[in-house]
Amino acid sequence: MLRLFLILHLFFFNVYACKGGYDFCVKKAKDAKIIHGRALFIPVEKNHRIVFSRQKPQSKILKHDPFLSLYLIEEKTSFAYPYDLNMRLQLGTAIVNAEEAKEGSMLVHQVGLDFFGKYSQKLSLPAIISSSCCSLEAVVSKKGVIEKEYLQYFLKTEKVRYADIGVRVNDANRSVVVIASDPYMPDNPFKKGDCILYYDNKKVKNAASFMRKVLFGSLGVKHTVQIKRGGKLLTFEVQSRQRYGGGFLSDTFLEQKGIYFDEGLHVSRLKKAFKNYGLKTGDRLIQVNGITVKNQEELRKYIENFKDYSSLLFERNNFQFFVKIK
C-alpha cells in the first residue's frame, strides 16, 4: 500500500506540477544553450555550469573529474532557470537535446566507472536525460549514460576522487560477481568469480548500488565484505584506497603505477615515476607476461596473473623492448 501511495503521489505531482511536458524541456535546453558542438554546458546553481566535454573548456574551471570528463565552470552571468538534480524517484524520463525529446527508460544502470548506463531511446549527441519537470537525470555520452548520482557526487565533492577496494564487478545470475581483481592492491583478498553478498553487514542488491557505495566512500576506511567462493562463505576486512582508472581513463590496473593507455594500447599518459622505466607517450604495448594483448580488457585479464613482477613488451618505431613492473 505504501508503494502504491508513493507512486500515485509522484504521478499527480508530475501531472499537475509539470504540465509543460518534454516539449518545454526541449525549449529549456535550447534557451539555456546547453549544447556547444560536441559538449554539454548545463546551468546549475548560482552562475555555475556542469560541462561534459572531452576537451578542456575555455572558462574559469572550479573542478574537474577526469574519469567522467566533467568540469564545473563559473560564468559571469547565470541562467534564470537552472537545472536541478531531483534525487527522488521519477515516473517518466526522456532523452533530450535542443531539437527534440524521446520518452524512454533506463535499460541498464551505470556500474561505477566500468560500465556506463544504457537508455531505451537514442538521439543525436550530446544529449541529457530529463524528467517531465525538466530536472537533470543524466548526461548521455558516446560511451553511455552518466547517471545523476555521479553528477550529484561531482557537485558536492570539493575535490573529485573515488575510492577503490580492488575489484571490478557486474551483475550475473542475480548476483554481484567479481570480474577482475587488482593485483597491485596490497593484500587484495578477492578473486575473479567471487560473489559479493554483504558490504559492511548490509546485503548487496546489485552491482550499480554496490559500486556507488565503494566509489563514494572515504579513503583509508576499513570495510567488512562477505563473499561466496565456490561453496564457501568468507569474510574479509579491506581498506579503501584511491581509484586511478576507469570511465574515460584506461582501467588496466597499471594506472596506479602511473601508466595510462588509449584504446589501441599506446601509452597516452605517464606519471613522473614511470619515466624512469624509459617509456614515452606513444609507445605501444604488445605483450604481457609473454601473451599478446590487443585491447585494455585483455591487458587487464593477463595482468591479474601478476605475482612478483609483470613483464611488458613495448614497441617504438619498430624497436621492441621489455619493461618489468614490480
Image (cartoon, helix red, strand yellow):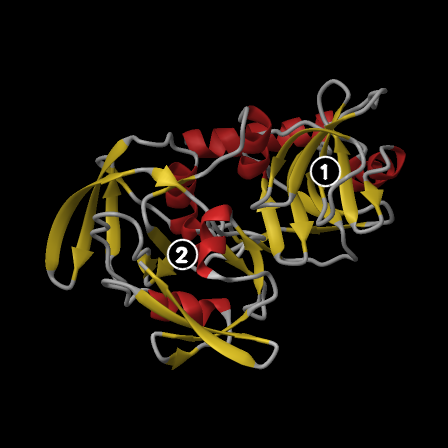
Badge 1 is on which residue?
51
User: Nearest the camera: 227 or 114?
Assistant: 114
- Count of numbered labels shown in the rendering: 2
Badge 2 is on which residue?
253
The part of the image, by quadrant, that contains residue 56 is top right
The part of the image, by quadrant, that contains residue 213 is top left
Residue at (32%, 37%) from the top-left corner?
240
Amino acid bearing label 1: Val
The answer to whether residue 26 shows anywhere in this view is: yes
User: Nearest the camera: 326 or 10?
Assistant: 326
- Tell which residue pokes out farthest to the left in this image: 232
Q: Position of residue 305 (x, y in %)?
A: 28, 68
Whole-number angstrom distance, CA of label 2 to CA of label 1:
28 Å
> Which quarter of the figure is the N terminus placed in?
top left
Question: Are dots 2 and 1 in contact, CB under 8 Å?
Answer: no
Residue 166, numbered circle? none
The answer to whether residue 175 shows anywhere in this view is: no
The part of the image, by quadrant, that contains residue 293 is bottom left
For marks 2 and 1, the one nearer the N-term is: 1
Left or right: where does residue 184 sit relative to residue 228?
right
Residue 216, compared with residue 48, is above or below; it is below
> Which quarter of the figure is the C terminus placed in?
bottom left
Left or right: where does residue 17 sit relative to residue 295?
right
